[in-house]
Each structure stands twice: as C-alpha cells, then as structure tokens.
Amino acid sequence: MGKKTIREIIIGPKSSYHLIDLHELWQYRELLLVLAWRDIKIRYKQTLLGIAWVVFQPLINMVIFSFFFGKVAKIPSGNLPYPLFVLSGLIFWIFFSNAISNASNSLIINEDMIKKVYFPKMIAPLATILTALLDFAINLVLLAGSLLLFGRIPSMATFVILPICIIVTVITTSGIGLFLSAVNVKYRDVRYILPFFIQLLLFVTPIIYPANMLKKEHLYIIALNPMTGIVTAFRTVIERSGTIDYSLLIIGCISSLMIFFIGLVYFHKTERFFADIV
C-alpha cells in the first residue's frame, strides 16, 4: 500500500504588497450578492411602500431645495429648470452619502459572521455599495422621466459621460467606505461624526448651486472632492450647452484613485484584527 499524502495548508496574512485579491473576490461573488440582497430585504421589510421609498428621498429633497434655493434664494441653474438642476446632482449625492453611511457600519452589522466564518472582509462594505448602486439605478430612471416631462432629450454625450461619472463615484465611495468601515471597528464614534461630515460636504459640493458661482481658485480646491467634477460634468451634458470642464473631472478622477488607494491600504493593514475587536 502506498503512503498517504498529507497536504499541509498554512493560512497566514497576505503580503503587504497584495492589497486586493481579485480572484478571491470573484470566488466569493455569490456572498457579495447575498449580502446585498439581504440588505435590501431588511431595509424595506414591513414597509407599506417598499422600494418606492428609494425615489421619495430625492423627490422630497428636490421639492425642499427648489423652494428655498430656487424660488426664495433665486440661485441660478443655467439652462435647466431648478428642479432638474438639483435632481441631477442629488441622485449622485444620495448614492454617495447612503453608500458611505451604510459601508461604515457594515463590519459591525456582520460581526457574528466575521468571527465565525472566513471570507474576504472587503465583501461587507462592497455589498452595501452594490445596494446603493441599485438605488442609484432607480433614481436614474426617475431623472430620465423628469427630463422627458420637462421636454429635455439627453444628448449622445450623456451616454459617454454618465458611465465615467458612475465609475468615479463607485471608486470614491469604495475608498471612503473601506476606510470608514475599518476605522469604525475600533472607534465607534464614526457613526456619530459621519452625518455631520456628510452634511458639511453637501454644501461644499455644487449640488444646490452651479460650480461657476465660485471663484476659479476656490473651485479647484473643492474639485479635490471627486463629486464636484462628476456633478458638474453630468449637468453640462444634460443641459446641452457649453463644454465640459475636463480639468475638474480629471482632478476628481485623480483624487478618486488616491482616496481608493488610501482606503484600501488602511483596510488591508487593519483587517487581520477585525475578528478580535468587533
């Protein structure tokens, strides 16, 4: 009889240079979808209107902002009616704010699973971003319907710029989400500080006002916030007037990649301790 071969498997920490294992993430893609679907079901469980609440958030904000900033404050909105102007920015902003808020708590919510089962911890925050992306898709349909209601037909450039804006937004939210989820494991103050940070960031992002209201030197400072270039570029193409300020978009893209890298590095350095802390 031949000798039995015993295969030894050593599980150890990943190399510090191996920040993300795409093959491993692909292997756990079903878990990603399961967690995302679970988030959706929990969120709308025992609600009368269900997923219709997704469109209520931008609609209610659009009405409030249109009254106070469009009617009362008379903030200019270019060639777009103010409701369309603010809605075009809100759909990106709501995706951004909801994604990072939910991602920041994702590891805490999945505490039991993290302690008992091995899986790439990155799956947890990424699942919340995937859920927010579904909400964004629904709100995008809302915007398309609103454009048609106001007699606005999107130009072909919209279908080129929109995917770029979505990709940059996803990269940005992923970076911030990974960073905050890791920080929140150790410092639970994040859940209290984050709403104030998001509210402040709303007013330094051209959501309720056009970017051209700002001085050039101030504009390039807030362009470090990737949402500035995204919202400005998207509005330009749906207005069908003027040219895209590619400098803002390029600054936003570079900033987005830096944010993602920082978030990924911090998450990677701290994830081995998650099971001991949560």
Image: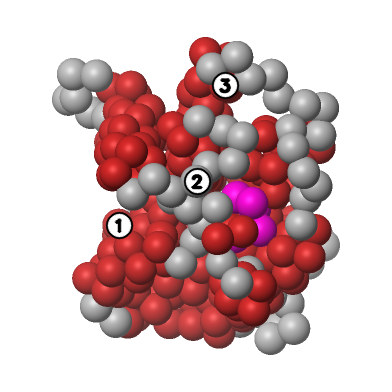
| Residue at x 17%, y 25% (from the top left corner) | 46
Mark 1 Cα shell of 10 Å, populated few (<14), some (14-19), many (≥20): some
On the image, the x and y values in percent for residue 269 come to 55, 84
The Cα–Cα distance between marks 2 and 1, rounded to whole angstroms, is 42 Å
Up-down: is 135 above or below 264? above
Note whether residue 46 is visible.
Answer: yes
Up-down: is 208 above or below 34? below
On the image, the x and y values in percent for residue 97 come to 41, 54
| Residue at x 23%, y 28% (from the top left corner) | 45
In the rendered image, which residue does mark 3 sit on? 147
Nearest-to-viewer mark from 3 and 2:
2
Q: Is residue 199 left or right of residue 121?
A: left
Magenta region: 228-232
Identify which amino acid the numbered label 2 is placed on. Answer: Pro
Q: Does residue 203 show up magenta in the picture? A: no
Up-down: is 135 above or below 119? above
Identify which amino acid the numbered label 3 is placed on. Answer: Leu
Mark positioned earlier in the residue sequence (1 or 3) = 1
In the rendered image, which residue does mark 1 sit on? 109
In the rendered image, which residue does mark 2 sit on? 76
On the image, the x and y values in percent for residue 274 come to 40, 76
Q: Does residue 229 show up magenta in the picture? A: yes
